Image: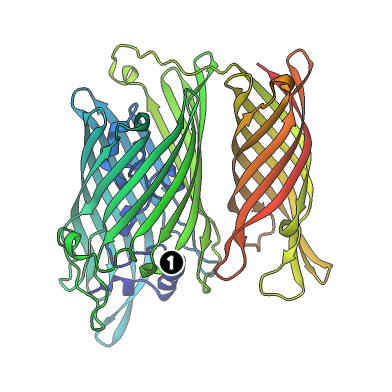
Amino acid sequence: MIIRRIFSLSFSLILLLQISEIQAQSTQAMYYLNYPHSVYSLGMGEQTVALRTSEDALTYNPANLVFVKKPTVSFFHQPFQMASYLWGMRFPLNSFVSFFNVKNIGSFGIEYIDCDWGEVKSYYFDGFRMVESNQHIYDRTFSIGYARIFSDNFSAGIQLRYAKSSLGYFTTPAATKKVFLSAGLNYSPQILDNKFNIGFSLTNFGTTVWYEDENQADAPPSKLNLGLGFLPIENDFFSLQTQLAISKPFDRGPMQNGKIQEAESSFKTLFTDWDDFPNDAILHTGIAFNWKPIDLCNGFAFFQEFYLGNYSVGIKTGLNNFYTHGGKIGIEFDGLQFTVGYAGRWHNVHYANYLQWIFPYETVQFTFGMNEDILFGAEKQLVKNPKPKNIILSIGVGKSFRVGKLNERQYPGLIGVTEGFNNGNVFFIEGAFYINEQNAIVSNVFYNPTYHSIKYQGNELFDSKVETISFASSYRYHPLEMFLPLYLQGGLAIVRLNPTLSTLYPKYDYKTSLLFSIGGNVEVYEEIFLSPFCNYNLLLSKDGDTAPGLGGFNQFDLGLKVGYKF
């Protein structure tokens, strides 16, 4: 029998949850345990089962704890400000996690999660009288995980999680406490120089989640995760990591004779809940462009990471399909490391009854790590970060030209009405870290203010200023040794659009863009360069109104940079 806690929330909250698709697998209890708890996993399509990282090991594969490089503590915040403009609600999720190694024993992870919905107004019947009550609704968990390397290419891990929920009540309380078990494996076949990685895990397995009312029960939030990771490029300066993974929830089976099946233990549904496979499966794909810490001299190092992913749900849950992205920047100094990251869903093929969120789906994460010699007083670790041949720091200005649908297109659902973005100036700063004379990895920040115009039959109705800020990571190549100044460049950018009109929704938004550039570094004085450039910016965004596909919108930037070589 489906738990009756949904009736303890107001009608608006129920509708909001349905629209926002916050809990796609609604027949499982405590489904928030399957949400990403790191920007890495969210950016990679909400999965890290087969990646060589300890990020979110306690969510997707405890065996990945073996990839802990240094003791770290991390704070992850998911505000869930996905509220429609009809309701101003938030459902924040906070995760506090620590990873560390113990010599000759193994790797450990500890995590505390607080998912607090605050005070929610609920109604229930006392006889024939409706009673109004305020309920504090929350979910909290504590986890500990352990993993060990058993050979050069094989590791295994296990995890225990204690979870507590208080979800208000309808006629009886909806509260419970539960212990879940997770286990996982990670294997790197000895082919192609160990570039492949296979990950497998069973997460959050347990018995039926019974609430204080014996008639209220749900299936535990159990999943099978299986993935293949591939590392096509890795050198001293950066790596390119990809993943293809699938996850299958174990919940109630499909309706039989018009009745929903009873909730059962996942130790049983592991063998019985396969009738709706693969319609209930989730496909995760992702690619990561990760810089390794680059020596900036005097003990300082800099690095950044970019992620791009896709999350596709089978037809059992309505073909919910969205794209994810994320990024992280970090600084190291004398064995200490600090990083800050962002990730979110930036495109969703939604339903016709979709209501615009006030805020985008976004998360933030802060991580602090230190070498073991600092923490435990061991012998000082000698870490030699790669040193670039040279660094060119530049500032630049240019003119943006928006063409095609980005300049003007039919406004969805309104005949004779068009919308578009005007041309404008673009300003940016850039750091190019040269591996050698012909290859460099490049970090950019762009600022491109513009106006969003609405027109009817060619006559402008109104416009509003939109501030566009982009953070990009690219690879630069100088193809001609005989004319070394010429370069070609390509990469990814996370784009934030800030409308200045208070009535527009969302209040701000994120997109992904593909960047391609051609330019030249011309030395005009000792270590001073002028660089004319032409950028092609392909902004990826929704193209349509009802259940839109993903479209490309074109922008060209022409300008000049001034740089200094260190």
- How packed is label 1: few (under 14 Cα within 10 Å), some, or many (20 or more)? some
The residue to which callout 1 is attached is 319
- Residue 255: image x %, image y %? 26, 77
Identity of the residue drawn at 64% across and 42% down: 515
Q: Nearer the viewer, residue 168 or 225?
A: 225
Examine the rendering and report whether any part of residue 53 can be seen. no
Residue in view at x 31 percent, y 53 percent: 33
User: Does any portion of residue 119 appear in the rendered image?
Assistant: yes
| Coordinates of residue 109 in the picture (x, y in percent) | 27, 37
Q: How is the image coloured?
A: rainbow
Residue 413 or 87: which is nearer the viewer?
Answer: 413
Q: Position of residue 308 (x, y in %)?
A: 50, 46
Is 45 on the left-hand or right-hand side of 85?
Answer: left
Q: Quadrant of the N terminus?
A: bottom left
Rendered position, 99 above or below 213 = above
Point out the image quarter for the C terminus. Answer: top right
Indicate whether 196 appears above or below 350.
above
